Amino acid sequence: MSLDVLRSTHFSYDHSIISYGIILWGNSNHSEEIFKIQKRIIRIIMNSSKNASCWQLFKDLNILPIQSQYIFSILLFVTKNKDQFLSNSQVHKINTRQTSDLYVPTANLAIYQKGISYSGIKIYNHLPTAIKALSGDKNKLIQTSFKKTSIT
């Protein structure tokens, strides 16, 4: 089979299974096992040895590793549901550099910190200000995020 057919098959089958509900399980202990399976699939597609590094293979196929897929999915969730989160400007009226950031609630439980809303806020707040400014226009945000998160 050609590389395009194998890549297309990967996106229609493997990628759809891997990315289904990734915002719920992407931060779990099992994601490492799934990443190993994803690397095995990439090596099969590229017909490389089982000891070959996958970094360049992911880049050549233009496929995000599972960790990057998780971060991207979390960011899309937060941007689509931004009205469900408080911003720092809503919590306090002091004008600081973090005024445009989302408010991070206090959390002592690790299970809450691994959850969608808490980790989503933390990841979103680490974005550059220019990308946060695009969050109102979701099409531009997706295009810019793909450019910024591409493997280099």
Image (cartoon, rainbow, N blue to C red):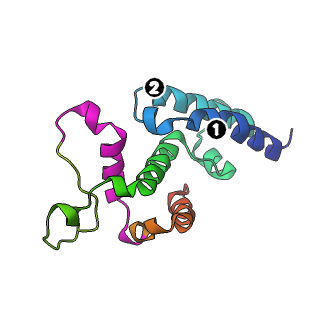
Which residue is situated farthest in the right direction here? 1
Q: Earlier in the sequence, mark 1 or mark 2?
A: 1
Residue span colored magenta: 107-130
Q: Residue at x 20, y 32 (%)?
A: 109
Is 109 in the magenta? yes
Say which quadrant the N terminus sits in: top right
Which residue is situated farthest in the front direction here? 83
SS for tag 2? Answer: loop
Q: Residue at x 57, y 38 (%)?
A: 19
Vertical order, 112 against 123 (above or below) = above
Left/right placement of residue 129 relative to residue 110 reads right
Which residue bears the numbered disc 2?
A: 30
Give the x, y percent position of residue 90. Answer: 21, 63
The crowd level at tag 1 (other Cα within 10 Å; few <14, some 14-19, many 20+) is some
Vertical order, 59 against 18 (above or below) = below
Q: Residue at x 63, y 30 (%)?
A: 40
Give the x, y percent position of residue 119. Answer: 33, 44
What distance separates the C-alpha of mark 1 from that of mark 2? 16 Å
**Amino acid type shown at disc 2:** His
Say which quadrant the C terminus sits in: bottom right
**Amino acid type shown at disc 1:** His
Foreground of the two, 93 or 124: 93
Circle on res. 15: 1
Residue 51 in sight: no
Q: Residue at x 82, y 42 (%)?
A: 5
Foreground of the two, 86 or 32: 86
Give the x, y percent position of residue 31. Answer: 47, 30
Give the x, y percent position of residue 97. Answer: 22, 71
Circle on res. 62: none
